[in-house]
Image (cartoon, rainbow, N blue to C red):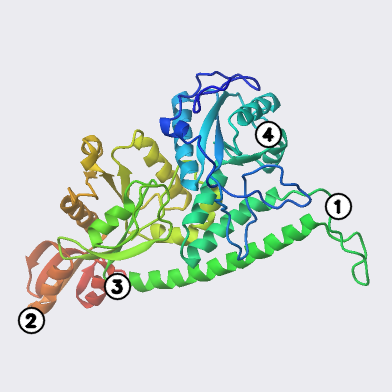
Amino acid sequence: MAEPLGSPRGGAGGDSSRADCEQTSAASAAAAGTHRGGIAKRGVQAGGDDTHRGGFGEFGGDGPGLIDRAFRERIVLVGVVRPGGDTSATDASLDELSLLVDTAGADAVERVCQRRAAPDPATFVGAGKAREIRAIAEEVDCDTVVFDDDLSPAQQFNLEKLLGRTALDRTAVILDIFAQNASTPEGKAQVELAQLRYRLPRLQGAGRRLSQQAGGIGTRGPGETQLEVDRRRLERRIHKLEDDLRRIAGHRRTQSKARSRTRNRSAAIVGYTNAGKSSLLNRLTSATVAVEDRLFATLDPTTRRLGLPGGETVFITDTVGFVRKLPHQLVEAFKTTLDVVRDADLLVHVVDGSDSDPDGSMAAVRQVLAEIDADEIPELVLFNKSDLGPGAARLAERTEGAVAVSAATGEGVEGLLGAIGDRMRRVASEVELVVPWDRGDVLAGVHREGQVLESTATEEGMKVRARMEPGSVGALRRYVVNGWDGS
């Protein structure tokens, strides 16, 4: 007799407990209806037979993409609690994985938890647990089993044989979502590169008997298997995408240099996925970035000018959202896009004030920032969604320098603009100038372009200590007596 959908599972194959994870939401249980879509069709394996539904499609090229949504797949989720690990943390991670699966176009209908001292090298969860998961999968008629941790190619291959259906990991689901949402040529190229890097070590064949080319003049020998042909084809495509993205990176560097020569600073909006970053950009700049209540709705950066209360203008950019266990392939592939974060003068870190674990979300974002060498950039923490309750205000009170806003209603936006202006002025260069008495226009420009900290009358003219942008200082370099190195 099957247990209710979404109930926790324990059992053989490791030290496990039926109470390891909390029950999934009623929505997951209700999702046990008709199959209407799918994460993706099973990929082409050299000599492999399509014996079940679900899984990854063939990557690369100009085909229709990864997703075939003729039906909505039913998914079993699997999580592992390590020694010293927190069961509630594992359950929260599975909750997020369920949202990721839903965003990918499938339904999580069951979840399995296991306590394990260390991953099994062959099957991650052990052969006994894998057989138990297969029984559960058959019981709930699932198409795919998704693991909350990364699987090695060997583990994935062995699990698919034991389970009789596709085995995917969290990385595969996130890659699938990115493939759906990429819209610009750059975004599509970055996602495809990440997919190919993920796919390459997972190519599987049935040995040297397949598709061997006949020997001939210049081709003596056993020939090539289909597996070798597929591998070479994917490697060629990877090299082409890498070349394309290097060219795009060069264009971005040129644009960044041109922007740095202006008098405008730049800020990047970063944060966990679905924290409200695009809504914030729309609120601040009247942009029209698409806003949806789902994970990874925005992949491509959008930059707009933003006027601050002090009269300054900055460039502010909405960036791709981050998530726990963000695949390394995506971080590497999206480094071109994330250059805008690394080059920013200020990071506006948006946190969902209604999140049940805001500290965990902030830690996940900062981990990715460290991975792209952006962890030393000044940060302004912003707790969003203050309209949903007092959580954002409470979090802002306990976090030094943070602000609480509602991107949906505009509450707190004026305070945010003031905070951005204050932070920007802090990163400006502090210089001393002596402006001749007959150059009142220059003195007025100093007041207009920067923040005057101190003025002293001297015989030569007005001696001014001010905080100014590098571009503004360069235009006034003949009057600078301290603090300008000519760079």
Q: Earlier in the sequence, mark 2 or mark 1?
A: 1
Direction from residue 468 to residue 372 in the image, left or right: right
x, y (%) of residue 160? 69, 38
Asked whether residue 377 is in view, the answer is yes
Tell me the element at label 2.
loop
Q: Which residue is mark 3?
A: 262
Residue occupying the point 48% across, 49% down: 371
| Separation (CA) of disc 2 from disc 1 | 87 Å
Residue mark closest to the camera, 2 vs 3: 3
Q: Earlier in the sequence, mark 4 or mark 2?
A: 4
Q: Identity of the amino acid at label 3?
A: Thr
Q: Which residue is mark 4?
A: 163
| Separation (CA) of disc 4 from disc 2 | 85 Å
Q: How many marks?
A: 4
Direction from residue 449 to residue 267 in the image, left or right: right
Q: Earlier in the sequence, mark 4 or mark 3?
A: 4
Residue closer to the observer: 322 or 466? 322
Direction from residue 155 to residue 403 in the image, left or right: left
Q: Earlier in the sequence, mark 4 or mark 1?
A: 4
Residue closer to the observer: 3 or 177? 3
x, y (%) of residue 475? 24, 76
Q: Which residue is mark 1?
A: 208
Q: Which residue is mark 2?
A: 438
Residue occupying the point 13% across, 77% down: 442
Q: Identity of the amino acid at label 4?
A: Leu
Q: Residues within 10 Å of mark 4 (few under 14, many from 20)?
A: many
| Separation (CA) of disc 1 from disc 3 | 61 Å
Residue mark closest to the camera, 4 vs 3: 4
Numbered tag placed on residue 87 in the rendering: none
Tell me the element at label 3.
loop
Q: Identity of the amino acid at label 1?
A: Arg
